[in-house]
Amino acid sequence: MQSLLAEVSGRRFALPLNLVRKVLPAMAVTPVANAPHVVDGIVEIRGQLHAVVSVARALGLGNGEIAADHHFVLAKVGELLLALHVDRALSVIDLDEAGLVPFAEVLPGASGPSGAVARAGDELLVVHDLPSFLSLRETQATGEVLARHAEARS
Amino acid sequence: MPVARPTEALEIVRFELHEESFGIDAGLVIEVFHAAEVTPLPHAPSHVRGLTNRMGEILPLLDLAPLLGLEPIGASAAGATRCVVIGRDRRPDFGFLVSGVSGVSFVSEAGLLPLPEGTAGGTARDFVKGVTAEALIVLDGDLILRDPRLVVSMDS
């Protein structure tokens, strides 16, 4: 499975490449009201509004301040255009699907997060499931933020 | 001279969560180890700290403290995380974070006292077998391993 390898707060993880549209240098973000905790704000890229998602905050790895050498990974998840803020997008890798272990096989409890984990030497590499990277509530609130600002612009 | 095992005694591993002392059936404890790296996950319940690599095996790392009515356990200053790995039949189910491990000892199950009123509520009481006269809280490891929030289900 082709995946984008990225890093946040010194931790590497993978995102399935099929939903990734582009990687750009991080840019200035417009803060917005009533955004979910994981959303930094919005950016306009080629005329389209994207919600900037802090991967650091989504993973509980600190506040994730945006720096000039950081990257935005653009992805379309359902109807949402997202710019995932990562410290660095590193490379495209090919993960052996047979070696991926779904979270459901290793995590306790019936309703856990979606995704899979691969062993990369001593390291565990999490392959995040982009459609469920935001919770249902976060997805809904992010959609409302984008719709509100798109309407205000038109 | 070795200490004789008391009749009707339960062998426990003693550990600390913050300032509280706990014990769990030593027969369920597979090992105590430092998880050098914990991989966090989005939207995981508060008692799921993440995944760790234990000798090439993917092991969930939990924080039982919130389920026992305590504040979550923070990572140690050294960056390593000490945890107790438990499971049945020597197969690890999960590791849980501890503030420290103080050893192995025997307690008399018959001599355990009920948890005093007001010390813990809800789930915490469900997981407790009783308290020793030295204020060591003895957990029911079998109940913990059967709790739906803590059981790994491949059907989920």
Image (tube, coloured by chain):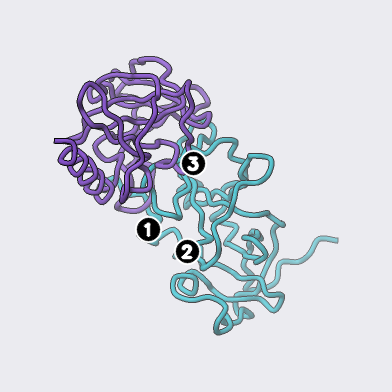
Chain colours: A purple, B cyan
Q: CA distance from mark 3 to mark 1?
A: 28 Å
From the image, state whether disc 3 or disc 2 is nearer to you: 3
> Which residue in the structure is indicated by mark 1?
B149
Q: CA distance from mark 1 to mark 2?
A: 10 Å
Q: Which chain hosts label 1?
A: B
Q: Amino acid at mark 1?
A: Arg
Q: Are marks 3 and 1 in contact (CB under 8 Å)?
A: no
The chain containing the residue under callout 3 comes to A
Q: Which mark is residue B67?
A: 2
What residue do we see at 40% from left, 32% from top?
A126
Q: Which of pointers 1 and 2 lies earlier in the amino acid sequence?
A: 2
Quick one: B6 or A128, which is closer to the camera? A128
SS for dot 3:
loop
- Tag shown at residue A153: none
Q: Is residue A54 left or right of residue B128?
A: left
Task: Give how far apart the Cα atoms at labels 3 and 2 are.
Answer: 26 Å
